[in-house]
Image (cartoon, grey):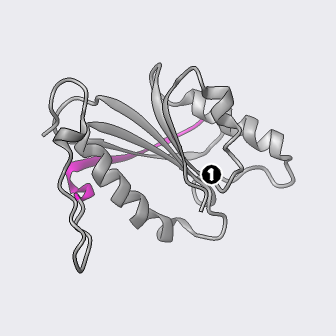
Amino acid sequence: DCVSGRPSLRNAPEVTLRESLTLPTVERCRYFQMKSRQGATVHIWEPLSGPVQQNVLYISMPMFLPWVMQRPAIEAFVGLAVEFCARVFVITHGSPYVPQAGCSLTEFQQDLYDLICELPLGQRFLLVDHSCGVATALIWQLKERLSVAVVMNA
């Protein structure tokens, strides 16, 4: 269950590395989708128990991985995030979000920024950027609203 107040590492779930990695699962979450005005699908997970303490935006843009291959890794992240009472919004390239064909990087980033502004993220949120660099510039535009930004460009 989510604890009241701010989540801390003292309340972190135990993660053990042995022969396999044991992680909390998304079974403790409610999953739904939201359609943007642009027609993009945003995947959303939130904890089943306790109030949401933090919103997390996860931007995943590995261009050569379809959603079915991205989803298990994102769900592992979500499983941990909901232990800290976080609602996780996921925008990913391909099957829910496809930029207009032939658009420039600047146009792509503006469309993505507009999409982010539509989301009910609240005044402050945590950003996980796994966009291989194409969305990283948005950190500067969103800096006043970010509590934390994590860039994972692998």
Q: What residue is rendered at 67% in x and 43% in y?
A: 136
Residue 113's quadrant in the figure? top right
- Region rendered in magenta: 24-37
Amino acid type at circle 1 is: Tyr
Name the quadrant of the C terminus. bottom right
Picture coordinates of residue 64 (x, y %)? 65, 70
Q: Quadrant of the N terminus?
A: top left
Q: Looking at this view, is 103 or 25 the one in front?
A: 25
- Figure check: 24 above or below 126: below
- The x, y position of residue 90, in whole percent, is 48, 47
- Residue at the image point whose x is 39% and y is 66% from the top: 72
Label 1: element kind? loop
Using the rendered view, name the quadrant where residue 39 is placed: top right
> In the image, residue 19 lies at what x, y percent?
23, 80
Dot 1, how many residues are within 10 Å of its Cα: few (below 14), some (14-19), or many (20+)?
A: some
Residue 118 placed where, x, y %?
57, 28
How many numbered marks have been drawn onto this rendered protein structure? 1
Residue 127 in the magenta stretch? The answer is no
In the picture of the structure, the residue carrying the numbered disc 1 is 97
**Quick check: is 36 in the magenta stretch?**
yes
Residue 70 located left or right of residue 110 = left
Establish if 75 lies above or below 41.
below
Instruction: Identify the residue shown where x is 17% and y is 40%.
Output: 11
Residue 14 vs 150, above or below: the answer is below
